[in-house]
Amino acid sequence: MTVRVRYAPSPTGSPHVGNIRTALFNWIFARKMGGVFIARLEDTDRNPDRYKPEVIPELEESMVSLGIVPDEWWKGGGDYGPYVQSERLALYQEAAEDLIASGNAYRCYCTPERLTKMREEQQALGLPPGYDRRCRYLSEADRARYESEELPSTVRLAVPLEGRTTYQDVVYGQITVENRMIDDQVLLKSNGWPTYHLAVVVDDHLMGITHVIRGEDWQPSTPKQIYLYNAFGWEQPVWVHVPLILGKDRKKLGKRHGATQFYEFIRSGYLPETMFNFLCLLGWSAGEENREIFSVAEIIERFSLEGISRNPAIFDYDKLRWMNGEYIRVLSPEQLTDRCMPYLIEAGLISATPAQEERAYAEAAIALCADRLKILSEIADLTGFFFVAPEVPEEKGQRKWLTGERPLQIIATAKSLVAALTDDPSVEDAEQIVNRTAETLNLERPPVIHTLRVCLTGRTVGPGLFELMSVLGKERMLSRLDRAVGWVLKE
RNA sequence: GGCGCCAUCGUCUAGAGGUCAGGACGACGGGUUUUCAGCUCGUAGACCGGAGUUCGAUUCUCCGUGGCGCUGCCA
């Protein structure tokens, strides 16, 4: 049987890294098994506080950017559509009627007010909250009366009062729950729309889903869904719950943990390939191999549901940052420049449509800073001095290297050597200039190097001096050396 | 409160009834050098507690403790 798995996001917000990881696991498993990866939009919650259709493009783009485009989904179609729940309402309503007819569900006429009050009272008494099943035991007369009065109603699942439900979870093993602990879940809201529990079961069955791979927070509702599969006489899928991703405070990763939305990471300059690799390693391990960096193909090759961990994982921003540096370092200068361009343009360091020469200059500058780059957005700070001459030197550099007579001598000597150049210097030429300056002034190289670095870049740290001199070129060096004279402090 | 799940370095994790409990990030120290980064070498750092099973448990069982999740006409 062909494996069919799905990613079922709700348009309630920009995709979260936890959701993205679930999508990744589903996609990888599908590829591994030669199966089908489906995406379905679960848009049954129309509460304006939560329903945010504007995030749907981000849902789509996040998958595209990671290279996990679904085989069947709302954008590309498929044989089991529609892949949007709001377009499948009749299916759920019909299913709910079937359940009522078979005695597995009932209409509930309780008002939201009564339910709220009931919950409050239960809380106050320290009782477990849950529906008191009043409408489950309505007399035929009452039921008929409510119907004739056209009272709004929901449809609730009539959970068996005795026995227990046991299921096998690929990750967590056997899980057993007493049926009497399960609430009579609302399946169909009074507006005729389904809740998650009904819709997910109907759709997963109709779409032929074989494995449900989802977050561990869904685990408690699995017995209700199993009951539904049984009530419909449908075969249940294989259950796979994956551990949650937590923030530093060990709480389910949420808004207050800083960046948690997939796009925040992408926007700030984490590479999609980094996110793919990193997220896969949160809660899944290749086993004995002592490696962290895996290509997509290598992950697919090694992936197995059994390799999924049971413990929740804390999202480690430091490790992500490290890994992104690793991925940046294997990029060619051209690729890296392509990726950095938007950040340089945004910072106003280069024009929006750079000419050949400007682009080449940027590429040379970026190449020199690549080792230092961990997040693409940092490129503007790292390479800024290449594009804009520093206005003032770093205070520390000025104090240490631009005080007294010596820097003036270094500047003058170096400047005359640069001026004598017929062309922009090579790296070797630059080194010669430094060596001659040192010899002429009878100095060691380090003070010359450090002084010139501050003069040319305004900073005390950065790429190798000879390399950056070569990239800067003759004219920029001359004007910067001139300006630096004014930076020198009298003792 | 109830129910469920989980428990190895600070973090992500590997691991087997007997291991010097392995790797990675981070931290710290050395080397390379022209600063930072990178690269490289190295150091510190963990089996939640208590019973039980066993010749032997960090590994198996139970209890405790702690953490998390769920407990909505949200998903």
Image (tube, coloured by chain):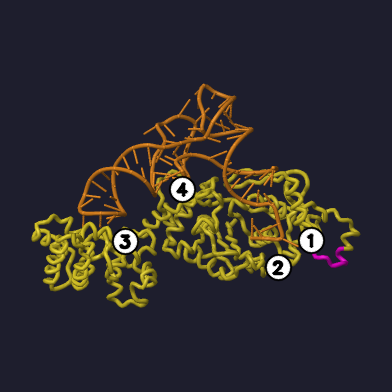
* Image-based side of A148 in relation to A382, left or right: right
In the figure, the shade used to draw chain B is orange
- Circles 4 and 1 in contact, beta carbons < 8 Å: no
Q: Residue at x 70, y 52 (%)?
A: A224
Q: Are marks 3 and 2 on the same chain?
A: yes
SS at mark 4?
Answer: loop
Q: CA distance from mark 4 to mark 3?
A: 29 Å
Can the viewer see residue A34 in this picture? no
The answer to if A406 sits in the magenta stretch is no
Q: Amino acid at mark 2?
A: Leu
Task: Report the magenta residues as a range.
Answer: A146-154
Callout in the foreground (4, 3): 3
Chain of the residue on which disc 3 is drawn: A
Q: Which residue is mark 4?
A: A286
Q: CA distance from mark 4 to mark 1?
A: 51 Å
Q: Residue at x 40, y 57 (%)?
A: A324
* Image-based side of A243 in relation to A352, left or right: right
Q: CA distance from mark 2 to mark 1?
A: 23 Å
Callout in the foreground (3, 2): 3
| Dot 3 crowding, Cα within 10 Å, few <14, some 14–19, many 20+ | many
Chain of the residue on which disc 2 is drawn: A
Can the viewer see residue A217 in this picture? yes
Q: Are marks 4 and 1 on the same chain?
A: yes
SS at mark 1?
Answer: loop
In the figure, the shade used to draw chain A is yellow
- Circles 2 and 1 in contact, beta carbons < 8 Å: no
- Circles 4 and 2 in contact, beta carbons < 8 Å: no
Q: CA distance from mark 4 to mark 2?
A: 42 Å
Mark 1 or mark 3: name the one nearer the start of the chain. 1
**Residue A423 occupies quadrant:** bottom left
Q: Which residue is mark 3?
A: A370
